Image (cartoon, grey):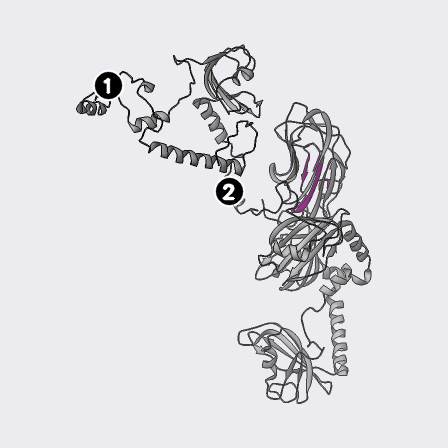
Amino acid sequence: MAYEEKTDWLPDDPINEDDVNRWEKGIKDAHTDLAAHKNDMNNPHNTTKAQVGLGNVDNVKQAAKKDFDQHEQDQVRHITEDERVTWNGAQLSKISADNGQPMFNLTTDFHTELQNYPTLTYFSYDKTAANAPPSGGRGFWTCSIGKTYGHVIVMTNDNKTFRKSLANNKWSDWIELENTEGAQKKVNVHEGKSDIHVTLADKDKWNNSQLFKVTADNGQGKLYLSETDDFHKIVPQNTGMVHFASAPNTVNGPGTSVRGLWTINATGNYGQIIAFDNANKTYRKTISGGNWSDWVELETTAGAEAKVSNHAKDSTAHITVGERNKWNAGQLSKITNDAGGVYISIGDTDDFLSKIVKSGERFGTFYSTGKPTNAPSTLSTRGFFHFTATDSNGNGTFGYVVAIDYRNNMFTNYVDGNLGWQGWNKIETESDAQTKADKSLADAKNYVDTNYSNQKLTILTGSNAIQDARTAGDVYPSGVTLMDVGQENTTGYPGKMGFVKNEKYNNYRFTQYFYNNGNVSYSYAGTGIWVRQWYPQSGWTEWQKISGFAHANVGTTGKQLLNKGEHQKIIFNRTIKDSHKAFDTKNSRFICPNNGMFLVNAGLYIESVQRYANYEMEVYLNGKIYKNIGHYRNSPDDPSDSKQFNIGIYGAATVPANAGDYIEIYLYVGYDGDVQRYITDSSGWYNYFDIAELGGQNFPTL
């Protein structure tokens, strides 16, 4: 079939497969006909000499063969194939005038005039032309065939370079291009901005981030489950993490339209779904080993809090602090078997004492026959034992055993790590013991009445009083004693005056209390009670406060101007409560009355406008920043100096400090614009500085 041409193409006509096949067929047929014509040496067109302008030429050879060969070898008059290829690949369209000057000069309007010229043109222009750069100059213009897309670059007479683009018949603004020196300066400035460049650590972190696509390109669900879809079938086929949405009646769905996430392992048999509906409900479903659970509706915060609140009111299901303290003080080690019977059984062939010690238990109950070696009685016994520890040979280092046989005889034995077992002692009967007890009581009463009074027993005075807190505990007398600590004592007591109570059972059981009872109306405001313990091997423990904790509530008065770009101390000058007169309103600081851990709470209410702002509230300890406790940063999309609003910054921190250390509140102030910012003159529930002492242990100096 002959080639059928199409001559009515339009710029936006689609090209389909039939068009391309038609062109390929036409080219092939043309090549076939051309090849046949080239191979036809019989003058197929019957061309005559006259027709080609050779009618007057004789039918003789016009030049000698050697002359023709010489001419053919003349490389000056002829071109080579390489030269022809090179020139055919060169610029064949005209982009400048014959003298190398611009093809045209723009005088009226850049936009309309450029679109009238070829796709690549060298031109000049007047600065008065519409849409021209601010100075005259020269440039190049290149565009698409349809002249709806293109680029223009100009070099102005004042040594500047500008660029403009045409896209879909819409022109961009002029963009000034930098010279090498100017660009390099900007590059150098830009290069120094570490906050906008990535580091290797950033790249490593991002490369380890979420690289798997879990949503559609528009951020919506990656999959939509219709009413005919089945959660149990769709989910295992889409492993990994998927953001989805579903119809209200999707098969095996929660019964409502939901959006959510699922995460499934690579084999599709383990995973979870969490989904949210439009009624603010949350659902969860799990697949484990290919088996699906039912949907579980998760509780809202309000619902959970209501249930917790109702549950908290159930006194039968909870314990009180008193009960907890009582049980924590009770027997927490196992002393019987699970049925409540004896913990260790001692048989006929056992060694009574060795069997108990080698059990490894420090406290427990036992049953023994009357035949074991080292038994206290020839009768079977029951009893209990208690050791402080056992050594590697199974010998009790310190401890005792109490045994009672079925005739109601009681025996005790004590082991000393250095001396070994002390031997069984039979406990007196009640009547014998009572007789001895009565005599001992009478003797003791007579001795006390003769030698002691209550005053002599409890109060140490004169040379017997120990004023130096550094004195070792083994110097103190046994029993309960009271001592006065004179004024301005600086030997290591928590306060400079008060009194001490000593409760000494022996050198290994000694507790000392310090009572600071200074005049709270003057400078001695550190009232409270401290306690410490003595042990020969380690000495005195640190003092720990157990009552009389300090606290203060302080506010502001009036408005306070905030200085832009500064870390500024906040002026708190209104004392609401101050238990130990520890807050200095002149310097807006809390001075710690004693060593301890202090809880600091602070709040500021700031007058601001809708512009970029950065506020950081900080706790300062002894004039240096200790912790950042509140941070507000905002960069609104529509900044305005006229839109006013207030900002609240609140935070808390614990601060360990020593007596005399001081605590202050600072605010870093950063914002755009010239409108001044202020701390408002709001009352104490907006602007406050609260301090509460949590514990009085002596922390190391910071």
Residue 386 picture location, percent across and down: 65, 74
Which residue is at 76% across, 82% downward? 430
Give the crowd class for mark 1: few <14, some 14-19, many >=20 residues within 10 Å: few
Foreground: disc 2 or disc 1: 1
Residue 142 picture location, percent across and down: 48, 22
Is residue 42 rendered magenta in the image? no
Who is closer to the viewer here, 622 or 366?
366
Tell me if I can see residue 137 in this picture: no
Secondary element under disc 2, as helix, strand or loop, is helix
Amino acid of disc 1: Asp
Q: Give the number of marks.
A: 2
Residue tagged by mark 1? 58
CA gap, disc 2 and disc 1: 86 Å
On screen, residue 546 above or below 568: below
Residue stretch in magenta: 578-603
On screen, residue 77 above or below 280: above
Give whichever of discs 2 and 1 has the lower sequence position.
1
Residue tagged by mark 2? 203
Secondary element under disc 1, as helix, strand or loop, is loop
Which residue is at 32% across, 26% downward? 84
On screen, residue 534 above or below 645: below
Image quadrant occupied by the C terminus: top right
Residue 220 picture location, percent across and down: 66, 43
Amino acid of disc 2: Lys
Is residue 589 rendered magenta in the image? yes
